[in-house]
Image (cartoon, rainbow, N blue to C red):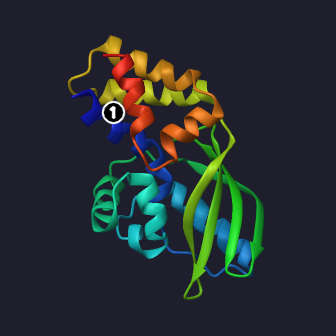
Amino acid sequence: MIKRLLVPLALLALAALAVTACGGSGSSAEDEVTEVIEQAATTKDPSSCTELQTLRFTEQNTGEKGKAAIKSCEESAKEEEQAEEAKVSNVSVNGEKATAEAEFIGGSLGSQTLAIALVEEGGDWKLDQIEGFANYDGKALEESFLKRFEESSEGLTKKQYTCIAEGIGKASTAEAEAMFLSGASTKIEELAKGCA
């Protein structure tokens, strides 16, 4: 029961970024990259799961593969707590590839800064991969998880979900990346088992 509930909650914490909206008519590639990331952080449009993010990105953020990843993204899009804003910085464009950092204000990723890779496909920029935490605030992520668990703790006791949230809060940057960005649920499952 813990595994069934925890893994989706953990992966959905990062799925706030996984839902994207159409890129804009920015005057430069840097502007377009910035706009895609800003919209990705704030939209709830399920159709965007296939429009401006690669399958690789969707799989990383849902823990699913192929069509199942897209379906999971679309189903969670409307339910996710989006950021109020994303502050994009350090944009670097090299041909059809780009990188940037995004600091999230509000939402399930509030106070976190992610390093993001993008690719250009057919003239449009798409989110391709979260490369890591550029700035990790474990305490803020712990508080976000506590809030989420309190709203939907299906089958978990308060002691269990508090233990899980505290474990997330104490994680180092490398441990948090292994839990949330690897595309595998092993580390988060280990944390949950220790709280059973």
The answer to whether residue 58 is above or below residue 84 is: below
Outermost bottom residue: 122
The image shows residue 68 at horizontal and vertical percentages of 27, 62
Which sits in the foreground, 39 or 73? 73
Compared across the picture, whether 150 is left or right of 170 comes to: left
Q: Position of residue 108 (x, y in %)?
A: 49, 39
Q: Quadrant of the N terminus?
A: top left
Total number of numbered labels?
1
Q: Position of residue 70 (x, y in %)?
A: 33, 65
**In-front residue for pair 127/81:** 127
Dot 1 surroundings within 10 Å: few (below 14), some, or many (20 or more)? many
Q: Is residue 36 left or right of residue 147?
A: right
Say which quadrant the C terminus sits in.
top left
* Residue 160 in the figure: left or right of residue 154: right
Q: Which residue does the numbered mark 1 point to in the structure image?
A: 6
Is residue 24 rendered to the left or right of residue 22?
Answer: right
Q: Is residue 43 visible?
A: no
Residue 159: quarter of image: top left
Q: Residue at x 40, y 37 (%)?
A: 186
Three-letter amino acid code of the residue under disc 1: Leu
Task: Residue at 40%, 58% (x, y): give it.
Answer: 44
- Asked if residue 171 can be seen in this view, the reply is yes
> What SS does tag 1 mark?
helix
Extreme residue in the top direction: 159
Q: Position of residue 104 (x, y in %)?
A: 61, 45
Residue 173: image quadrant is top right
User: What residue sits 47% from the left and 65% below the top?
Assistant: 56
